[in-house]
Image (cartoon, rainbow, N blue to C red):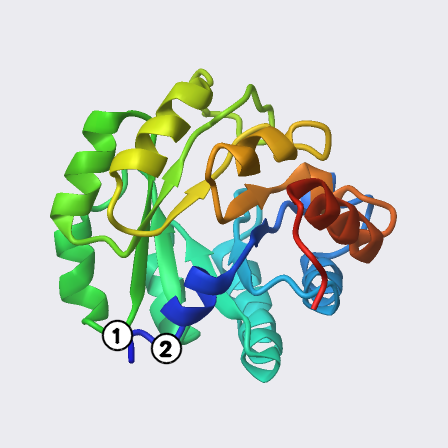
Amino acid sequence: MTRKPGLAGLLAADIYGITAEEHSRGRSNIEVVRQMIAAGIKVIQYREKEKTLREKYSECLQIREMTREAGVTFIVNDHVDLALLVDADGVHVGQDDLPPDQIRKLVGDGMIIGMSTHSPAQARAAVNSGVDYIGVGPIFATKTKKDVCEPVGLEYLDYAVNNVTIPFVAIGGIKEHNIAEVARRGARCIALVTEIVGAPDIEAKVRALRAAMGRKED
């Protein structure tokens, strides 16, 4: 048994969904999450930079209800306060956010903490800090995030596969045409943003991604 209810879902996930309303073809985050859940995605992160905190809170409340009913792990990006207020399964932070050991003091042992990393040194530091999983990337160039660093390439992914002892999520510029290489190198959980939220048919896109990864539908 795990002390964190959502961690089992994260460990079992093949695709890690992330919201991005500006790339969602006019659909709301709520509608996109509904379609992600219908597509069988088992972990969803709420990432929204442009809205007010009140708007984010309202959306997170709705998404928490949807994900809880579907048995989907729900992660909130950056906002520890939002994650706590809506009883999310976890919070994901970057290198410039609050230190994980301080976040742990706020959220306790029952909440998942994830952290973005861009190098082996950052991965080692994150693991030593007690996070539950790390993001590994950006593997390829991406324009989804405005403040993203240069791509780290497949070499860092190879390092993570062979050396990181906690779950990790490969992320950054991953599309249907290159996801097979990421999976082939050993990534078990892969995050995609615009490739999913910008798809005309999200369920069809997720099926295609799983086929490209060599995964079978349940």
Q: Do the numbered discs 1 and 2 sit on residues whose CB atoms are within 8 Å?
A: yes
- On screen, 197 above or below 181? below
For this orientation, the residue located farthest to the right is: 200
Determine whether, in the image, residue 204 is placed left or right of residue 174: right
Question: Which of these two is toward me, 81 or 186?
Answer: 186
- List x then y, in percent, for residue 203: 80, 57
Classify mark 1: helix, strand or loop: loop
Q: Which mark is residue 210?
A: none
Residue 56 visible:
yes
Residue 174 visible:
no
- List x then y, in percent, for residue 192: 61, 41
Residue at horizontal 71 percent and vertical 38 percent from the top: 195
- On screen, 60 above or below 186? below
Q: Quadrant of the C terminus?
A: bottom right
Q: Total of numbered circles in the picture?
A: 2
Q: Which mark is residue 110?
A: 1
Q: Quadrant of residue 120?
A: top left
For this orientation, the residue located farthest to the bottom is: 69
* Mark toward the start of the polypeptide (1 vs 2): 2
Q: Quadrant of the N terminus?
A: bottom left
Q: Which residue is mark 2?
A: 5
Q: Residues within 10 Å of mark 2 (few under 14, many from 20)?
A: some
Q: Residues within 10 Å of mark 1 (few under 14, many from 20)?
A: some
Determine whether, in the image, residue 23 is placed left or right of residue 74: right
Residue at horizontal 28 percent and vertical 75 percent from the top: 2
Residue at horizontal 37 percent and vertical 64 percent from the top: 90
- On screen, 172 above or below 211? above
